Image (spheres, rainbow, N blue to C red):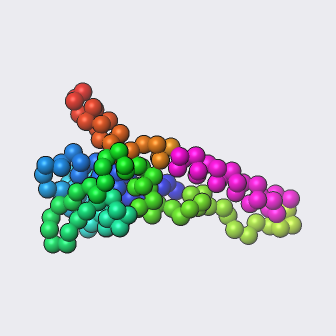
Amino acid sequence: MSISSRFSVGIHILTLIEINKDGVSSSEYIARSVNTNPAMIRKIMGMLKKAGLINVQPGIAGAELARDLPDITLLDVYKAVNVVKDNELFSIHENPNPDCTVGKNIQKTIEPLFFTAQHAMEKVLENVTIEDVVKDVMEKETKR
């Protein structure tokens, strides 16, 4: 099972809002870019708004970033769209056999490894900003 696509769509939305800052970034406009329906975009935009990453007003088409580009990290987006709860990126199977050597010890053995792996991934996301993503997208566009 992979991380919810809400994460990549959230990054897409924020990047598009910045690149289209002189235009109107309505949910319909963004949905065409993501190639999905506007209702899904509105749901994710609601999450981004609640996290303080975008400003939107009911009944008025468009959105804008609520923070400066360098101040929005991928970790902010990851947390905003409720990808996973803290320390729950990896699920551990429940109720292994307590009469088995592996069964009674496996959870305590792998749980700290999973926490460390999630923390490492989150550190990477914390060090990449939407500004970095926008720059990379624009760089790729100019090379076309």
Counting from the top left corner in percent of width and height, residue 138 is at: 25, 36
Tell me: residue 71, above or below residue 66: above
Tell me: residue 28, above or below residue 17: below
The region drawn magenta spans: 101-123
Q: Residue at x 70, y 57 (%)?
A: 111
Depth order, front residue of 140/97: 140
Q: Residue at x 42, y 42 (%)?
A: 128
Tell me: residue 135, above or below residue 25: above
Relative to 89, 102 lies left or right: right
Relative to 116, 57 lies left or right: left
Image quadrant holding the C terminus, namely top left
Relative to 112, 137 lies left or right: left
Residue 40 visible (yes or no): no
Q: Residue at x 28, y 32 (%)?
A: 140
Relative to 105, 37 lies left or right: left
Depth order, front residue of 64/16: 64
| Predominant SS along the magenta part | helix
User: Does the magenta portion include 138?
Assistant: no
Counting from the top left corner in percent of width and height, residue 92 is at: 66, 61
Counting from the top left corner in percent of width and height, residue 85 is at: 53, 64
Q: Residue at x 38, y 63 (%)?
A: 51
Counting from the top left corner in percent of width and height, residue 83 is at: 46, 60
